[in-house]
Image (spheres, rainbow, N blue to C red):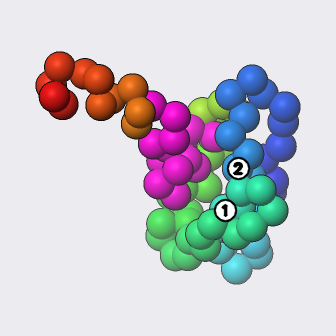
Amino acid sequence: MTSEGAATDDLGFTFRAFKSGDVEVSRGGRVVTLLRGDTAKSTLARLTSLSPEGQQQLLARMTGHYRQGNERGASGHPRNR
């Protein structure tokens, strides 16, 4: 199973499920992480129930690539002065 689509919220993540139950998460053609066991099963169940935009957000959060874009603006916030 592969996630594909040209959504406006596309962050470039794809996933593949293997017969062994493993789930491979890629971004930009490179493997970011490989999930196995119960983690792979639960993640695959969540991914299949989400929209393409939701899948992208979940994969970004799982791999740690969700912080890109707003770090510079945070330095100007009153709490961070």
Q: Residue at x 72, y 34 (%)?
A: 10
In the rendered image, which quarter is residue 31 located in?
A: bottom right
**Residue nearer the viewer, 2 or 66:** 66
Q: Are marks 2 and 1 in contact (CB under 8 Å)?
A: yes
Q: Residue at x 41, y 33 (%)?
A: 72
> As drawn, is 80 to the left or to the right of 36?
left
**Residue nearer the viewer, 29 or 77:** 77
> As drawn, is 26 to the left or to the right of 34?
right
**Residue sticking out furthest to the top:** 78
In the rendered image, which quarter is residue 74 located in?
A: top left
Category of crowding for the residue at label 2, using alpha-carbon neighbours closer than 10 angstroms: few (below 14), some (14–19), many (at least 20): many
Q: Is residue 62 shown to the viewer in this render?
A: no
Q: CA distance from mark 2 to mark 1?
A: 7 Å
Q: Secondary structure at mark 1?
A: strand
The residue where tag 2 is placed is: 13
Q: Which residues are magenta?
A: 56-70
23 is within the stretch colored magenta: no
- Which circle marks residue 25 in the picture? 1
- Which circle marks residue 78 in the picture? none
Above or below — where is 6 with respect to 55?
A: above
Image position, residue 78 (x, y; %): 17, 19
65 is within the stretch colored magenta: yes
Q: Quadrant of the C terminus?
A: top left
